[in-house]
Each structure stands twice: as structure tokens, then as C-alpha cells.
Amino acid sequence: MLEKIESAVKDFNAEINNVNSTETLEDIRVKFLGRKGLFAQLFEEFKALPKEEKPKYGQLLNKEKNNASAKFDEVKDEIESKSVSYDSYVDLTLPGVKRKIGNKHILIQTLDEIKVFFKGLGFAIYDGPELESDYNNFEALNFPEDHPARDMQDTFFVNDNFLLRTHTSPTQIRLMKTTKPPIRAIMPGKVYRNEAISAKSYCLFHQVEGLYIDTDVSFAELKSTLVSFAQYLFGADVKYRFRPSFFPFTEPSAEVDIWWEPKGKPGRWLEILGCGMVDPNVLDNVGIDSEKYVGYAFGMGVERMALRKYNIPDIRLFFDNDNRFLEQF
Amino acid sequence: MIISLNWLKDYINLDGITVEEIEDKLSTSGLEVEEITDYPKTLDGFVVGHVREKIKHPNADKLSLCKVFDGEEELSIVCGAPNVDGGQNIILAKVGAVVPNGGFEIKKAKIRGEKSFGMICSESELGISENHDGIMVLDPDLQPGTSAAKALGLDDVVFEIAVTPNRPDALSHIGVARDLSAVFGRPFNYPELKLDENKPASSEQVKISIEDTAGCSRYIGKVVRNVTIKESPEWMKKRLVAIGLRPRNNIVDISNYVLHEVGQPLHTFDLDKLAGSEIIVKQAGKDKKFVTLDSKERQLKADDLMICDGEKEVAIAGVMGGENSEVTESTKNILIEAAYFHPSYIRKTAKRLGLSSDASYRFERGCDPEITKWAADRTAALIAELGDGEISEGEVDIYPNKYQPKIVNLRYNRINKILGYEVEPARVKEILDYLGFKTESEYDDSLNIAIPSYRPDCEREIDLVEEVARINGFDLIPVKPKINVTLGVKVDESAYLDNIRTLLTGMGLNEIVTNSLLNSATAAKYGNPIGVLNPQSVEMSHMRPSMLPGMLSTISKNLKVKEKNLALFEMGSVFNQVGEGEIASFDDFSEIKELVIALTGNSVEHAWYTADDEYDFYHLKGIADELITKLFVDNQLADNYYSEGDDFYKYGFRKVFGEEVVCRGGLIENELTDSYDISQPVFVFTVNLTALKKIQPEEKSYTELLKFPKVYRDFAVVIEKNIDSGEIISDILASSSKLLKNIKLFDIFEGKSLGENKKSLAFRLEYYDNAATLTEDKVEKEFWKVIDKVKKKFNAQLRG
């Protein structure tokens, strides 16, 4: 019995002193200290010993097993501290384990900001098709056929009756045809213009249309809403002006300029949106009584807002989708 | 349109008003000033210089060395223009001057070893024309040192105004002066006409008739005899140069001048070239060719409105005159045409010919039929004054549809209702009066207003409300502290897509937005695309029938800039023609929303805590499943798998709702990725969002939390390699009682020790009883039943 114990201790020591990885350490634990390990076997044999020999071997066996356990724990600590230790020394400067969250496209983020504002004022949000009828895109919106007003929007035509919508305004027509006033909604979406691609213009862009029809809507109501919007987007002290303009589907019509001072450059007026009171012809076209109901409408370009807000020098960057660009926002 | 401040002052007194105020008022009353050029300011540092001597540059063949006197001293200047010579007066940019075209500052320089103290300028460098054929040579009588602005007649400020298409009345100096008169409350005046008329009368020298009275509702002809064609005087040249026109001869200059003065396009014929001394306004009658005065041959259509003489066409009405009747140096007698042509006739022809002239631009927006006579007289008076002509008495005035002013009722309370603030009745009248809208009759609550002939845009009450609003100024419209809010359920049709965006970005994907126009070959590969008639380029001729090509080209572009690890998505509309033939209604094509997700490269890049982890099929499946789960439609979609090619996929899966394929995902075929120069695997998942949105999501509802512990049992089996784990799982689920809540495959192992074509799968079964703590016995029984079933059905061996 004594030989067996000594041999086990000798083997254990030989193996434990050569261990250099947590895997072999586990093997040693199983081999010697596990429930069916060598020491456990020795305890089984010990049970069968004659009564008089038990005290002698019992003490020895217990002592050696405890020594082995202690030694094992010591070596285990040592080995674990050699790899990465969370106990002994913590390198707090190591970077954290990366958890990646992706980015919405910066145009969508900008659009989200716009939506948040108008949703807060009780505007619904509607979607409309990009491939539209000439009627919805122009005629119903009071663009006479063969009128120079049509030159304001270079159009991609599919044929005489269908086109790629040049603005989100046809969604107004769809909404007014299917919904009874009061109507208060914004209508975001892609629009297309047949313009050469450059740093300043692209063949498509995103627009947000706004519409409010009720019995007591006035230009003052429109102005109050849009001034509040400009303040929301560009700060409470934004300097703005409403400048008379022309859109066939609103009258009076206005463009809203904000005073813009890019770093190191002289300030100038910058147009951010177009708006106006819905032209009675448009209401008549969709069967809304233009004497009883009054409405306002507005439209703004999302790219234009984002270019300025984020100091982006070239509109094409939005549509190139270079991952390094996407990751910036 | 360009407006000269000096010129404006002929019609309205603007004393005491600054340029900035004028700019501001123009812009805020509807005539947006896009740019102001203050010539004395931009030409500061440019003076008349006298070239005293020119010698060849010692070190350069094409350069010369000039001694230039600037009025004070003689400067040494290196010049590269071949036309520079001793004795010339030129425009000298002195050191410190900023060249308008290019914006660079002139500095002292050493050019090929010779010092240079300034620059001799061309017209293009000064920004006054496109002409850069050498330097500008000036009048030899000019004093050296005179400012360039003065010498060039540019001691003026010009406004570039963007006139909206509804305001043809503002396309002239008088028109702008009229608006300023209303804005500033100052009177404006037409210039005085001095007509010294002689016999014979115009009507004795020319016969005029209109055949197409719809196309031409007024035609005035007035004759001026014995003119001398010569250069215009300086004052007129200066005016024209200031607004960007190049002076030619007195006759051309005068018609340009009157057009920009009052907005009426004019044409001048050489009367002696008109066969039969006759003018007939009629349609071309048949397709034919016609040479315009720019010597270009134009293709006419039968319904183009033409000006003809007794034999032939002599001008395209309202667009451009003909070469055959043009005024030349030898012209003696002139017929002045001042007419009103119908906008749509002119627009149609000008557009088709791609010929936009100052005349057609105005006619197609709508001219003033009542100003024609004044304009003809003004032209005649100027020709008499500047071309020594004798004005023939009267004119031939054919005016079949005389202008009848429309009377519009304007209610004060309507103004207040639309604008949201009260405008005093007296102020309403005043504004309209300044703009030339006469009050026909007046009531307590409204006015009857006569619309002037120069305002074709005004025909309804709302048009007058706009006039009042813009002249009174939008500044006066109050900003209220409160607005109305309408209560009711608010639709948000963008919420569905926005939710998907949030889910996908949460899983680490970046959103892209690509061009929805593709080239025809690419588009045709992915569907039945719809083309545009007038594409910007062949690369963008068709609407995308699928989101896939935009995604693949985005990946391709990113790989070129070494962005190789990409997790991207895009949502957008895709367009497909339904059936063949012309698109005549919305039923002939589909426009649906689609989502595309793509994964390529590494999902995780190696770091101190991990090795590289490459995107594979299971990453894609994980994202797809999580998305569908979080949309609460996972129980309604069934998964189909395929390992043979399916369109663009080498292998992959579909998610189907009943019969409809709603989602597809998998590894993109090499052939396709190769065509985009993509040399790494790309995993793509596409969703028909329009179809997905229609599936009613499971209602969210509370499930009671677990009260008793779960019990787990693990087992591993060795089976044939080609048995799918999914098959085993569904089999176990089908054959177990409801105590089995979940199965997780937690290990897969293949190795020689298992034998050829074998694999080991390890599962963890999760048991739970809602009603009570599970007993060991019950679980053991369930568990061994499962194992027996699996062993038998899949010929599996239980492992260790």
C-alpha cells in the first residue's frame, strides 16, 4: 500500500511539474484527483485494508491527497495567470469586445428627423408610387399641358401618360382623392429629375411633401408651422425669410430661405423648401369644395438638408455607398 | 434675366435706396435675385493701360515684353497674347487686382526670367464675354488710368433675376420697375415717345393679313424708310453689354433694346425683300425646310406658325427670322413687326426645334397684346434717332381678337382667410393700383378688379390675393404661437420599413441607397424592366426590376477601395412590366417594395480576444430568421431549402407564405459575382416587403413566466453525413409530448474515428411542465423514447 501511495505521489508530481496548459491540467485532475482518479481508487483499496493498518495509511493517504490538491491549485493558478488573467492583473486599456450596430443611411436619418417633427404635430405619413401618371404628377396639380411651368422639372418619361414622378406632390392628389378633409399628412419618397449628374445634382433625390386641408387653414398657419420646423432643424435663432415664388399647385406660393454662413465663407440666403396655399384648381380637381376648404402644402429636399447639416461636399457621396462613408454617421 | 440698375432708373426714381434694399425687395416680392454684379467693385484694380513698346521676350518665343503706361508710371509686363502691340490701349490688371473669371489675384511675378507687374486682359478674363481670342484692344482715345468699369461702360450694377414662369410681365426693365414702384410706393413712367411721322403711310407700303387668328391675335407692321445701318451709339452699346448682349448694328440693337425695355419681342424685315410687300401669318401647311437668320436649316412641321410674304416663308413666328428677309448693311427700308403670338404655338415649335430665343421665351410665357403698338412706335422712334430713318405714318394693325380685360371679384374676407391676417381695404386697392390692376367697381366687402393685359397669370380671386400678399410682404404674415391640431388616428405608412431598418441596423448592417436607374442589359437580366424614353445616359435607361444589381455593384465598388467586410441592406421600389406592349394603366406594371441584405468578407475581424470569423450561409440565415421572428410572422412562413442553382443563387433557402415565395436567400453564383469583379463569396437575402407586409403578424400576448425548473437532457448520435439536422429535429418534435419545449443542436463533429461519411450531432432537450415540477422518471421516459425513435429512424448510434 505504501508503495502504491508513493508511486502515485511520484507520478502526480512528475506530471504536475511538466504541465503547461489548462487542457493537460484538466487531464491530470481527472487522472489523479477525479471521482474515479488514482487517489479515489486508493481510498477504495484503503477501505479493504485490515482494521489495524487503517490509521497509518489513512493519515498518509489524506495528507498526500491534500498536498496533491494544494499543489494542483497552485499550478492551476500559475498557469491561468500565464494566459490572460482576470484575477491578478486587469489591463483596463485593452479595447472592449466589439458589438457592432449598423447605420441607417444618412438620408434616412435626416428624413427621420423631419418625420419626428411633423408626427409630433399630428401629421400622418403616407407613401406613394414613383412611377406615376402624367395626370397625377402634372395635370391634377394644375400644370397646364404645354406650359413653361413643366420646364421647371426635367422629366423622365416612360411614355405619353406615365413618367417617373418629379416631385412627391402626386401623392397629395392620391390622398385627397381617397380621404375626406381634414387631411394632415407628410409624404416622403424618391423623386426623379432628368438632370446631368454632378456634385450638385443627381438624377434622383428624396423629397418630403406636406399637406394640410381644413376649413380654417391660413398662410399664417403654414408660416408658423414651417418657422417652427426651421427652428427645430437649424436652431431657435435661425434667420429665415419667406420669398414669393411660383408652383402651379399652390397660390400664393413661397420659398423659404435660411441665412447660411459656412465656416470661413460669407453668408448667403439658402433655399430650404417651397410651400404655399393649395390652389383652388387642385381642390376642384380632386372634388374638394375649394370655397369651404382651404389648405397648405410644402415640399422639401432631404439631400439638400443633409448636405448642409453634415457638411457633405458632393451629392454623389449619398449614392456611392462607400462603406467608409456609411460608417461615418 | 439680367436687369441693369442704370437702365431701371430711366423709369423709376430710386434715389436714396441702396442696392441691398433693392435686392432684398425684389427677392421678397417675387423676383428672386440670384446674383448681383457690381462692376465698379469687381473691376477694381483694372485700368486702361497704353502699350508704349513691345519687344520679344528674350527667353520665350511666344511671349512678349511690354512697357505699359497706367496713367502714373510705366510698368514692365509679360504678355502671351499674339495680338498685343505697341500703341494699343488695353485693359491692365494691376498688382492686387482679382481676375473675375477664375478669382485669382494678380501678383508681381518673374516669367521666364523677366519681371512682370500686372496682366493684359482678354474679355473672357474680365468675365464680360466668352471671347478669349487674345487681349481686348480699346478705343485709342481713352486716357490711360481710366477705370476699366468706366472705359467699358460697365459703371453699373446688374441683377440676375430668376423670373418664375408665371411672370412674363417681369421679363423687362419696365416690368421690374412696375413691381418696384408697388414695393417702394413710387411712381414709374414709360419713356416719352417722340414720333416724327412722314408720308407715305405704313398702310400704303405693306399689306398684312392673319390666316391663323388662333395663333396670332394681333400683328402690327410699321415702316421706317431710308435708314442707315451702322454701329449703335455708346450709350446703347453700354446698356446692352451690361445685360450681357453683344452689340451688332443699330437695327438689331434697337430691337433687342426695346425687347429688354418693355418685354415685347420685335422683328425687323428688310421691306424690299418681302415679295409683294406683303405679310401673311399662317401655318407652314406642310413639312418643309427653312433657313433661319443664323444660317441654319430648320425642319418645319405643317402646323408651325410662319410669317410669309407674297411668295414664301420669311420668319418662324415668334421664334426666329429668316435669312431671306434679314436686315443687312444694304437695307434701306424696314418693316417693324410687333405681334402677339399664342404661347402654346410658339412653345411647341421652339421646343421641337430646340431653339429658345429671347423672343420665343417671352411669347411662350405670354406677352402683352396691348403693348405692341407702343413697342412698334418706340422701335420706330429709336430707328429714326439712331439710324437716320424716316418714320412712315401710322401702322398696319391687324387685331382680330381684341383684349377684353377680365373682371374679377376680390373679397376682403377671402384675403384675410387665406393669409391669416387682415389687410386694410385701402392698402389692397393701393397695391393693385400700383401694379396696374384697375378697380372697376367697389363694394363694402369686395372690389371688382380689371386684369391688365400684361398679367396672363391672373384670372381668379386667388391670383389677386397673391398679388396683395407678395407686395405687402410675407414678413407681415404673423407667426402664431399656436397652431391647430386635428385629432384622430394617424396613419404611418413608413413605420413598417422603419421598424425593419431598426432591426437590421441593430444586427450590425449598414443601410445603402442606390440609383434606381440601370442600363438596359443589366435590368433585363433581373426582370421585365421598364425603360425611360429620354434617359440621361445609356447607363441609366431602365427602372430597376430588382434590388440585387444595385447591391452587387455597391459591393463591387467597395472592394475596389479595399472595403472587404460588408454587411449591407437596402429597401426600395422595384418595377416590372406586366405582360407585353405599351404601359397604358397602372395594371400594366408592378411597383413593389423590396429588401435586399448582403453579407461578404468577415463578420468579425481578429482581435486580441478572437480570430477572424468569415460570413457564411449561417450568418445570413441567422439574420434572416431573427428579422422574420422579430416581425412576428415566423410561424406563418415555411422554409424551403435547395442546393441546386436557383436563378442567381448557388444554394439557399426560400421562405414561403402558402404558395407565395416571400423571401429568398443564399450564396450568389460565382458567375454573377465574377461579372461584378467580386472575388469573395456574397450571401444575399431578399424580401418582397409588399407581400410580407400583407401577412398579419401574430398578436403579441403575455405568456405566463416559468414557475418550475426546466430539466435538460443531452445526447449525441452518430449518423450518415447526408442526413439533415433539421429533419431529426422536426422528427423529435413531432414524436414528443408537449413537455418537450425546445431542442438545441449544440455540437457537430466529423472525424475518422466515427467512420466514413459519418457525423456526430449533439442535442440538448429542454423539458418543462407548466403544471408541476417534473419528476426524473417522467423525463427519463420521455427522453429514452426520443432516443429510441432517432436510433431506429435514422439508423443512428448513440454516442458515449
Image (tube, rainbow, N blue to C red):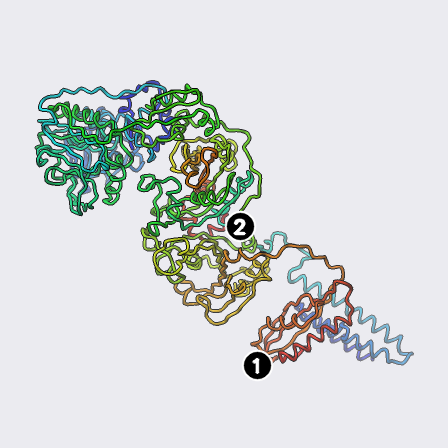
Which of label 1 and label 2 is nearer to you?
2
Q: In the rendered structure, the residue with mark 2 lies on which chain?
A: B
Return the residue at label 2: B498
**Residue A170: x percent and y percent?**
42, 44
Q: In the rendered structure, the residue with mark 1 lies on which chain?
A: B
Circle 1 — which element?
A: loop
| B640 lies left or right of B470 | right
Q: Is residue B250 above or below residue B495?
A: above
Q: Residues within 10 Å of mark 2 (few under 14, many from 20)?
A: some
Q: How many marks?
A: 2
Return the residue at label 1: B756
Q: Is residue A161 above or below residue B521?
A: above
The one of B793 and A179 positioned closer to us in this rendering: A179
Q: Amino acid at mark 1?
A: Glu
Quadrant containing the N terminus of chain B in the rendered view: top left
Q: Is the residue under label 2 in contact with that under label 1 (CB below 8 Å)?
A: no
Q: Residue at x 41, y 65 (%)?
A: B672
The one of A147 and B545 positioned closer to us in this rendering: A147
Circle 2 — which element?
A: helix
The answer to whether residue A260 of the structure is visible from this angle is: no
**Residue A19: x percent and y percent?**
68, 70
The answer to whether residue B745 of the structure is visible from this angle is: yes
Q: Amino acid at mark 2?
A: Asp
**Residue A80: x percent and y percent?**
68, 63
Q: Residue at x 33, y 35 (%)?
A: B165
Quadrant containing the C terminus of chain B in the rendered view: bottom right
Label whose residue precedes the other's in the sequence (1 or 2): 2
| A314 lies left or right of B285 | right
Q: Is residue B541 above or below residue B385?
A: below
| A150 lies left or right of A312 | left
- Quote the CA–CA distance across marks 1 and 2: 50 Å
